[in-house]
Amino acid sequence: MGKRLLRPGDAAADLRIPGHEDEWSQREATEILLVTENPYLLEEARRIAAAAGGRIHSVTAVEDAVHGWDTADVVLVGSDVHELPPRRRAPDVLLGTAADGGLWRLAAALGAERVAVLPEGAAWLAEHLSMAGAPDPGGAVLGIVGGHGGAGATTTAIWLAQAAAGHGMRTLLVDGDPWGGGLELAITDQDLPGLRWPDFAETRGSIDAGQFRDSLPVAGGFQFLSWPGTREKAGVPDAGSVGAVMDAARRSFELVVVDIARGTEGGRALAWDCDRVLLVTRAALKAAVATARILGELPPGEVALAVRTDKSASVDAQLIAESLGLPLRGVIPDIRGVAAGTEAGRLLEIGRRRPVARFAADVLDLNGKLQ
């Protein structure tokens, strides 16, 4: 669509999405409700909404927002809001600044779907508001989180991406752990051409979906975005850059599988981008206890469980699921050679085996959507 990347230092006017002016002007402006008493958040939200071509209605008190709450296309609330109107939908975005403490906890308490930290997240918010009226919300985002060390989350994420691609879906696998050594090392032993996370370190605003898709390496029928599998120091994208990449991913692919690092701020942020989360654990008591702690850190939403079991398993997989209060989505098969295959970049070979295919079928339907 002729979009370009927005970089730090761009003028405020550049928040307008290039290439969208005619397209967006042909449909009604996005109706935005903002609830905040914070003058800075109010001013920034109005500026961003104008850049995105939306109409904003602002109120300072929650009780004044009741009548327009359910009819607005997008509901924004400031970090000064701590209670919602009764029987109303959760807000779409919580607005705050870096100086606000506990933004993620507040978002979880309010049920907000996204968090925008201003001014850093201004370009992302402009794109989000522009896309709010789009007829196609994009693909599904499935997060994979290990309940403890060695749970097998990365292996699970790779196999699910491979299975989805095998069903003909446009699939992206995202490496969500900057300190994991590079997910690509488990996929292939070759140096494949394409962009990695550090290449997006300075990205701002909207990324063209086609260019994004064409820039990524391909293996096993799916594309992936990995951290480099090298010892060289790499630039780490900030929250704004990650948000831009994840928005592009959703618009570019039918399914985005995200291997999320547990217990990190970046991991928690990526979890908020997911429509559903699959929590992976082993069939053992200690593992179940650790998984329960991780579950408490996840944002509100649909969470299911996958259990890795073997001959030494001390607890039944269904019992673990019941104790955690989660639906059991599948049992990860015990296959010899997984550890060696990971070291040799051969997990895709193992992923073609029937037990893996059956496990993936328990998580993904034939159309590639979560059951």
Image (tube, rainbow, N blue to C red):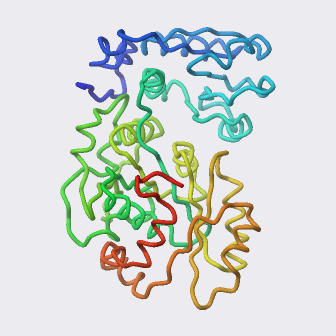
For residue 19, above or below residue 26: below
Residue 254 left/right relative to 66: left
| Residue 309 percent location from the top left of the image | 58, 81
For image coordinates 77% across by 17% down, the residue present is 62
| Residue 151 percent location from the top left of the image | 56, 72
The one nearer the camera, 305 or 36, is: 305
Quarter of the rendering occupied by the N terminus: top left
For residue 235, above or below residue 27: below
| Residue 22 percent location from the top left of the image | 29, 11
For image coordinates 20% across by 65% down, the residue present is 191
The one nearer the camera, 65 or 3, is: 65
| Residue 312 percent location from the top left of the image | 62, 90
For image coordinates 40% across by 43% down, the residue present is 237
Residue 253 left/right relative to 102: left
The one nearer the camera, 142 or 38, is: 142
For image coordinates 74% across by 67% down, the residue present is 322
